[in-house]
Amino acid sequence: MRSRLLLLRRAGARRLLRSFTQSTAVRTDLKTRPQLPFLSVTTTRTRVRHLTTERRAQLKYEIKTGVKYTGYIWIAGISLFAAYFVIVQERLERRYPTPPEWSYKTRMDLRGGNCARYEPAPGKITDWQQVAWWFETALKRLQDPKIDGKDVVDAPHDCPPGTKDVTAKSEEWRRGYYEAMMGYAKAAEYVDGWVLDKSRDIVFPPGVMIGPSNPYPKPLPAGFKGAPREEDCELRFESPDTVYLRIISTPGFTNRQKIEAGLAYASWLDYKGVTGPASIVFEDAVHLAATERPNLPAEPIDKKTWTLNEAAGAPSDNLLTALTGYATFRARQGDINSALPIFVSILKARRNLLTPEQHFQQTSISASLNSRPATSMERGAWNFFTKLFTLPPHFPSRTGSPEPCQEAALSLHIGEIMYTTSSSAREEGLGWTREAVDVAEEQLHLLPAPTSSAPLHDERPTAVARATCRECLATGLGNWSAMVRRLAREEEQAEEEAGKKKQGGSWFGGLWGAGVAKAEGDESAKSRWSAEEKVIEERQRRVQELLEDLRPPPRGILSFLQA
C-alpha cells in the first residue's frame, strides 16, 4: 500500500501528461521531443447568429406593440384634453351666453374676454391687457365681412371713423356686438396709453418709453426687460374716447344701450378731470331718455331743476338710470343744492313704481326661494351632469331687470348730502343712512345663497346683485359709524366746555366743580351717541358673514397635487 502511494507521488511530480494532445505553449518547459503539427489539436471559435429569425420576429412584434400602445396613449390624452376643453367652453357658454349665429372662434373670443374680466386666476387681479386682446379679436372678426360681419356696412360720414352700421343684423347679433364693444371700452380705460415695441413685439405700460415726448421715464415694472424707445413704439390699443363715441353713434343700438354707453363715457371723462364734456354727455343721456316716449301728458323732467315731473306719470327705467348718474355727478362736483332735489324725486318715483301688494308678493317669492333647502340630489354629482346636458337660453337679454339696492343707494346719497350741508339736518341725514343700511341688509337676505343647484347661466346676475348690495351695505355702515363718531366727539367736547364753565374760583368750589365735571363725564360716556356706537359695532359683527364671500376659491383639476 505504501509503495503505491509513493508511485503516485512520483507520477504527480513528473506531470504525467499526454504530450501529443497538448499545445506547444503548454509543453515549453518539457525536455521532450517536439510535437508534430499534424498531431496537434487546433481550437476554433464558434460563430453565433445574434439576429435570428425568431429574434427578428420578436423585435417586430415589440416595435409594433410599442407603436400601437403609444398611439393609444396619445389618442386617449388628446381625447381627454378635447373633452376637458369642450366642458370648459360649455360652462363658459352657459355663464356668458353668445349669439348662436356667430362662428365658434368668435364666440370663444367673447367668452374668453368675459372670463378674463370677471374670473381671474385665484390670488391674481384682472389682466386688462389680456381682456382687451380678447375683445379686440372678437370685434375684428365681427367687423370682417368674410367671417361674421356679413351685411355690416360703414356708418354715415357724420359718425366717428370706424363706426359700423349693424341695423341689418338680428337682435341677438347686435346685443353680442354691443357687449364686445362695451367690454373693449372698459378694458381700454385700464390700458390707456400702453405702447407696443415693434422691434421686440412687447407691450409696455405708459410712462416707461424713452424719447423726446417723455423726458423723465418711469422705472420698468417687475417682469419687463429693457425700456422701449420712442422711435420703435406705437399705441397698442385705441383710446376709450374713440370706442365710446363709436358705441354712442352706432346705428342699430337701442336707446338703453346708448344711454349706458353715454353714462360710462361721462364717468370716464369725470375720472380724467374733463368735467365740462362730462356734464354735456350726462345731459345728453338724460335728454335721450326723456324723449324716447313722445306721447306723454307733460314733460318728464323739469328743465330748470332736473327733477322728475309727477304729472308725466311713472318714469322709465332709462330715465331713472340716466338721472341718477347725472345727480351723482352733480354731487361729486359740489353742487349739492341741485343734486339733493333730484335724488329725492328719483327715490319717490322708485317707491311709487311698485304697489305694496306687488312689493309683498315679490318679497314672499324671493324669501320662499331662498328658504328652500337643497336636496341631496341637487348637491350631488347628478345635478352637475343634469346642468351640463341642459340647454341654456339662447343669449338671454340682460336689460330690463331692476337693479338691486337702488333705494338704498339713493338713501345713502341723500343722507350724506343732508349731513354735510346743514348742521341742523344732521340727525335727519343720519336717519336716511340708517334706512339705507336696513334696506341693503334686507336685500342681501332676500337674494338666494350661492349654491351648486343654481343654473350656470343664473350665477352671474345673482353674483353681480350680491356684490352691489354688499358694497352698499358696507358703505352705509361706514358712513353711519363716521357720522355717529363725529356727533359723539362733538357732544363730549361740548360737555367738557360746559363743565369747565361751572367750576368756581375758590378751592372748595374747584373741588366741587371737578367732582361735578367728573360725574357729568361719566354720564356722557353713556350718552345717546356712545350707545349708538355700540349698536353699530354689534351690527357690523352681525352682518360680517353677509359682507364676506366664504366660499373657497376654485383650485383647478390638479388641486390634489397642492398642499
Image (cartoon, grey):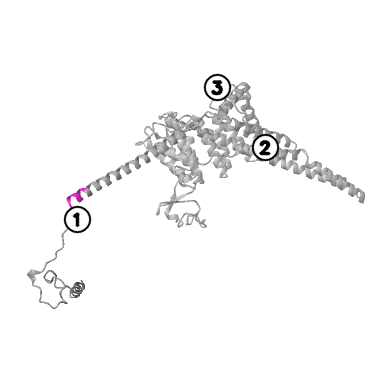
The residue singled out by tag 1 in the image is 50
The residue lying toward the viewer, choosing from 224 and 31, is 31
The residue singled out by tag 2 in the image is 539
Q: Is residue 518 above or below residue 166?
A: below
Q: Is residue 228 above or below residue 372?
A: below
The residue singled out by tag 3 in the image is 295
Looking at the rendering, the stretch of residues picked out in magenta corresponds to 49-57
Q: Is residue 546 left or right of residue 521?
A: left
Q: Nearer the viewer, mark 3 or mark 2?
A: 2
Local packing at callout 2 (Cα closer than 10 Å; few below 14, some 14-19, many 20+) is few
Residue positioned most to the bottom: 31
Q: CA distance from mark 3 to mark 2?
A: 48 Å
Instruction: For mark 2, give the secondary structure.
Output: helix
x, y percentage for residue 179? 47, 35
Mark 3 vs 2, N-terminal side: 3
Q: CA distance from mark 3 to mark 1?
A: 101 Å
Tag 1: amino acid: His
x, y percentage for residue 49? 17, 56
